[in-house]
Image: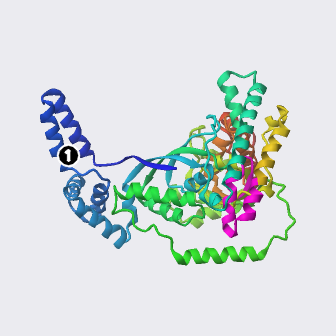
Amino acid sequence: MRVTLAGYNFDAQQIELIRQITDEFSHNGTESEYLSNLLTQLAEEPFTPETISAAYARISRSDKGIRDLRRDARASVSRARRSNENIIFGLGHSSIAEHAVFNLDITGISRLALESLEAHRLASYTESSQRYISMSGDFEVPDEISEIGMRDEFEKACLELFRIYGILSDKLTEHHSDLSGQEKSGKAQEDARYVLPLACRGQVGMTINARTAEKMILTFNNSHLKEVKSFGKQLHGELHKIVPSLIRYTEPNPAIQAVEKELSAFVAEMGNNSSEQDEDDVILLNSPHELENVALATLLMKVGNQDYNYYLNYVNQLSAQEKIEMIANNHSYISEHDPVRRELELGYFVYRITLSASAYAQLKRHRLTSQFKQDYIPSLGFIPPPSIQDAECTEIFASAMNCSNEIYVKLTEKLEGRQSSIAQYALTNAHKCRVVFQLNSRELTHFARLRMDTHAQWDIRNIATKIVDLAKRECPGLVQFACGKDKFDDLKSNVFNNKENNK
């Protein structure tokens, strides 16, 4: 794995200085004069986001203009750094570090480690997709597996999974022969990738601010995976040399580690005597049915001048159909690109979802939701793409699952305690995990737009459809605009036609 700093923000006046110098050279200067001028002036202009953070930190207590504050900060980087450290870590105003933003290239990272990375919601990620890119056989061999003498067996299993991936890609491409060239290969890769191991490497472009980076590094340093720990160290190294004053608390708290260890021991003592099977892949644990009234009362209060309880009493007297219509009336403007009103954020749906690694790769991108994920375990089973059976590749697919499960069992037998999570590297995109998933009505509508659309990947589309169906049974008013983008115009037409018919 490699982490490379690709870019970061610095003062616009510095950018203007560079532009002026290059303009001067192109029109008037000789090369020697240009280089001398460039080196002299740029040596006096430090390029670090710390000067912006330090300048903005003083806005609330200085009567100077922002431009002057930025100039003062640029004049002395050492003073700007001392100011940052005092304000961020001394006074506790951590938001100042959010003004420093970085772009990072992350290459050679496993699919499993990417989940630890992308679990941090206040960052932006663009990941290479196994749906559109043919995988060549590049995978991570964790140090933990080498240390227990299982490197050769693990590599052999991964190479076998990639071999089967190649066979399935060819057979599924032939199966989709009626499609165009690009669509045909895309469909084949989308489903063949289900046999790829979670050790498969990828790459991602990340944009992150210094405050989130510090929290991320702290989390990574506390990880059970050495690959993730290594990522944290590399990230810290790349950023600390640019913004040493903005990133400080990155070492795990021993007290927190002790609590986690006690919790793990307690769970282990509980054992596993349950015979219950996860037959339903989506279960609604809690819904905001009673908070539909809260959302409507808040909507009225925003434009009225009475106390909240006045409007709540009014809403409590409405029938279920009248509440649905009131929500609809306040969304007459809505198109497939418009979000529903923010009042619908009041109240949450909570689900327990059992889904494949491939589907989870889509779910995890909805970072404004709350997600709590278990490890992947073979006992939950796996999800075979429907095209596997249609193309008569069931036995080939089954051989990949057997290969993966066998090496997983061997690894868990040699690994102890929480270190058994290392064995997940041997599992595939088809294997399942459990997730507790919480989102509000507004985010659910956005989720449905993307994941129920006809262009969405079939696996997450199935999950999204079940999520929305359960929500609509409980709270038809709150989620009445939840559907895929391709179905939105029809749904909106039905909503307002029904409203007219009910008059």
* Magenta-highlighted residues: 407-434
Measured along the vertical axis of the image, is residue 461 above or below residue 313? above
Percent from the top left, x then y, of residue 320? Answer: 74, 54
73 and 246: which one is in front? Answer: 246
Percent from the top left, x then y, of residue 107? Answer: 51, 45
Residue 399 visible, this angle: yes
393 and 178: which one is in front? Answer: 393
- Horizontal side, residue 118 vs residue 474: left or right: left
Q: Main secondary structure of the magenta part?
A: helix
Measured along the vertical axis of the image, is residue 280 above or below residue 107? below
Snapshot quadrant of residue 30? top left
Question: Which element carries disc 1, helix, strand or loop?
Answer: helix
Residue under the image location 78 percent in, 40 percent down: 385
Residue under the image location 28 percent in, 48 percent down: 11
Percent from the top left, x then y, of residue 503? Answer: 73, 43
- Horizontal side, residue 94 vs residue 266: left or right: left
Q: Amino acid at mark 1?
A: Leu
For mark 1, what is the residue?
A: 42
Residue 425 drawn in magenta: yes
